[in-house]
Image (cartoon, rainbow, N blue to C red):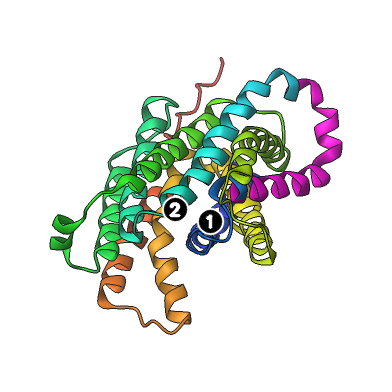
Amino acid sequence: MSDAAQRETRRALLLLWLVPALWAVNYIVARKAPGVIGPYMLALGRWGLAALILVLITRAELWQQRAAITRAWRQYLVLGILGMLICGAWVYEGARSTGAMNIALIYSASPVLIALGAMWWLGEGFGARQAAGVLLALTGVVHVVVKGRWTALADVQFVAGDAWILAATVSWAAYALLQKRWPSSLSATARLAAICLGGTLVLLPPAVWEATRPGADALGGQALLLVLVAALIPGVGAYWIYGWAQKILGASRVAVALYLGPLYAAAAAWLLGEPPGWHHAVGALLILPGVFLVTRPIKQPVKPPLPARS
């Protein structure tokens, strides 16, 4: 690996630690949204604003690559459905009727699905070390979610909202894998702009239906603030880093970073005056080594030198 590639890999690994922190903001938005803005309108505002920002930034590249984008328009619509409609509006819909524990438990399956898909479908290397890392991190996540009381899992009751979250979990795995499956000549920023445009198009009909039905939430200043926050932080910020890092590190190595989410949530709660418990410390002792094991570079076998020609 060249020095430039090594530097890029190090940057990707460093920025990857930010993704769960940025996504954690989306859970706050989801909890604040009911009664303020509907799930489809929130998702449309989030990705419509993100598309506008990204198109302005990459307009020259998008115009130059317009023929390639036109040929692959179906891919951008599919990615928009998976990443913006299902992983956007459906998460907001599910958060209306299910609890944080259920959401965290269901979402913990996402990195496992991505790792398995990357191994079987994309041919990415995933050995015993990576499997052990995923198992450690998954155990740590569940330990944090149940607050160290594993018997609490027997008391978990699944409700209708969990189906929305389950669909979003599977959809995110498909979104991550298809981005890797469908290579693109676009830069990470331009590609995200094209995906956001696809997501905006597929979100428009349900958002219009939601806004025009009787009893729809009236849009006000708080709704616009939620849209702005969702567009900039868990939207442009998290999705861009995730897509860019996945090109460099691979789908399975990037996905395991999602397990850092509970630790970031505990840190945020501590800053808000809620002291962390011992279950957070134990979870960290499991999650952090697990993430380290999965994100370590995969050693390539050293090829023996070719024999000199006589």
Secondary structure mostly seen in the magenta stretch: helix
Would residue 27 be counted in the magenta stretch? no
Q: Which of 154 and 32 is in front in this view?
A: 32
* Circle number at residue 19: 1
Residue type highlighted by circle 1: Val
Residue 2 pos. (x, y %): 62, 42
Q: What stretch is highlighted in magenta?
A: 42-68
Q: Where is residue 242 in the image (x, y as percent from the top left)?
A: 56, 47
Q: Residue 178 carries which label?
A: none
Q: Is residue 202 left or right of residue 32?
A: right
**At 51% across and 35% down in the image, what residue appears?**
175
Residue at (44% x, 53% y) in the render:
257
- Residue 307, given in percent of the width and then of the height, sits at 50, 21
Say if residue 7 shows up in the picture: no
Residue carrying label 2? 257
**Which comes sooner in the sequence, label 2 or label 1?**
1
- Image quadrant in which you'd find residue 149: bottom left
Q: Which amino acid does label 2 sit on?
A: Ala
**Residue 43 vertical position relative to residue 73 in the rendered view, above or below:** below
